[in-house]
Image: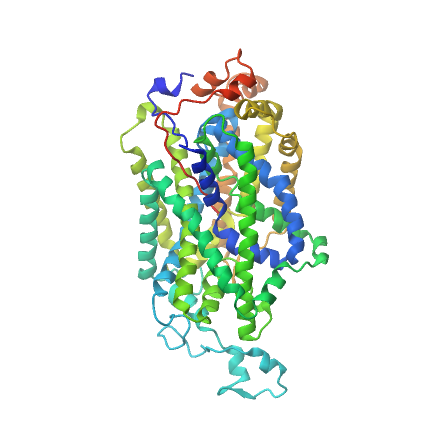
Amino acid sequence: SPSPQSQGFPERETWTRQMDFMMSCVGFAVGLGNVWRFPYLCYKNGGGVFLIPYVLFIFLGGIPIFFLEIALGQFMKAGSINVWNIAPLFKGLGYASMVIVFFCNTYYIMVLAWGFYYLIKSFNSTLPWSTCDNPWNTENCIEIFRHDDCQNGTIGNSTFGNLTCEELANGRSPIIEFWENKVLNISDGLDEPGVINWELMLCLMAVWVMVYFCVWKGVKSTGKIVYFTATFPYVVLIILLVRGVTLPGAYDGILYYVKPDWSKLGEAQVWIDAGTQIFFSYAIGLGALTALGSYNRFNNDCYKDAFVLALINSGTSFFSGFVVFSILGFMASEQGVDISKVAESGPGLAFIAYPKAVSLMPVAPVWAALFFVMLLLLGLDSQFVGVEGFVTGILDLFPGKYYMRYQREIAVAICCLLCFIIDLSMVTQGGMYVFQLFDYYSASGMTLLWQAFWECVVVAWVYGADRFMDDIARMIGYRPFPWMKWCWSFITPCVCMGIFLFHLLNYKPLTYNNVYVYPWWGEVIGWCLALSSMLCIPVSLVYKLSGAKGTFRERWENLTKPVWGGHHLEYMAPDTDIKSLASLSPGTEENKVIIFESVM
């Protein structure tokens, strides 16, 4: 194929400095999952013991696929769809990752909208979720909770304050009422969408506008912004840690987080949780990593980068556990309950447990605002990249002759608008049910594991693991440790398939708060969301094979022959050996900065 320049493509941008790439790695490593999912899993699955399966899966599944995606992007210099020109028959992998990342962009932003809403409400002298005298509170609202006195008391109707024990048992805390009655204004089920919450819709609009202006110029805008959004959350985490450790009860909380319970190692669920968490927090299978790699110089050492990134990513998860559990320990001691009563994960931690803990501190609004600023920045850079990765993939589909002047700005605008329209269903009274449906099915562990399994199989068995190792050696100047090759060929696909089957066999229908069970048609919608990405791979495979000519063998050979880009012809001239290639450096005139972040 003729080189991209001769067709009139604008040349693909690369990083200006290695530092920009490392910076993007830092921003990439910090996502909401690190702060709200990992600490809870660690606590639930036996504290320090959880680190054993976790670290094992980093080396068996996390790093190999992580490296695979970055190296593939760097080698093919293409976004998530065209990168599969390495084996055109399997381009369905690219389409699948686009579907997943589109759904992620759609529902993930809701967390930011809620965070933004809380942030605005934090600028009050008394936090609205700390008192019971607001219009949205019910008569069951109680500000002080000390259940343990009741449970220890022998007399059933002894009073506390002027409440009997029975009234205490039915009480609801003001933060739960604020979340369910004010923010969500939640209806009775998926079949009752109710009305749109205008305040939330304005927050949603504001966040989408922020995302748009961060992404619309591509490199030029994202590159500058991410230096801030990637580092500032660390500053806030350290401030919150210092604050947390000085609170009474913090020590017990942290002990709960890291204290090993060895009996847990025998439970399958612990291993499954560790594997799934790795796939989530490394943002594997979303195609954003591939797009990130595609802006590297051809001979950038992506092998080293993969390890640094993995270290930062998992280090952040572990560190944020201390922040979260020091605060939870404080809350447990304030309320006089066991820590298992207050430990939460996911949105429950961010919008119920944490705001509640904050309301018990002196100068509460300051700590609330700090926390929600951090939440917003953590999520925003993940959101940019999702949109960025999606738009990169779409624009790569249009060859140079269709190039328009403002095509990037228009593509980003269409993408944001489309997602915003779908999001309107999530700011209604039944919105939380829709949000959970997306969260549970569209980008769940199952879809990501399916994706990762096929990526390994295609590179290791269709293209050839040894062949790809040679290509990597051409890029970075030395062969990576053969461990990577064994992982791609045997270990990682088995790990992915094993966890995938475990999820499938232990499938439980979705519930909200363990009380509301989704109707059958809700579940059907959920499965449609999941299958829409998973079926891309087999459907496109069958379609391409049936459309080709010749015997099956001929079709297979034609369709799995890589389509090389112009830069390959330049770098892979047969007469140059690998050593001389390592010293070449590609022309760096007018290089620009592209920064990518994680999606989850």
Residue 386 versus residue 544 in the image, above or below = below
Which residue, as the protein is rendered here, is positioned at the far left?
A: 405
Residue 560: x, y in percent?
Answer: 54, 22
Q: How many marks?
A: 0
- Image quadrant holding the N terminus, namely top left
Residue 466 versus residue 287 in the image, above or below = above
Which residue, as the protein is rendered here, is positioned at the far top?
A: 575
Nearer to the camera, 51 or 26: 26
Whether residue 77 is visible here, answered yes or no, is yes
Nearer to the camera, 519 or 466: 466
- Picture residue at 57% right of the left edge, 34% below the top: 454
Nearer to the camera, 247 or 217: 247
Residue 182 versus residue 44 in the image, above or below = below
Residue 265: x, y in percent?
Answer: 71, 53
Residue 88: x, y in percent?
Answer: 50, 25
What color scheme is it?
A: rainbow
Q: Image check: 209 left or right of 104?
A: left
Residue 406 versus residue 566 in the image, above or below = below
Nearer to the camera, 361 or 388: 361
Q: Image check: 5 left or right of 37?
A: left
Residue 530: x, y in percent?
Answer: 50, 45
Whether residue 280 is visible here, answered yes or no, is no
- Picture residue at 27% right of the left edge, 30% below the top: 405
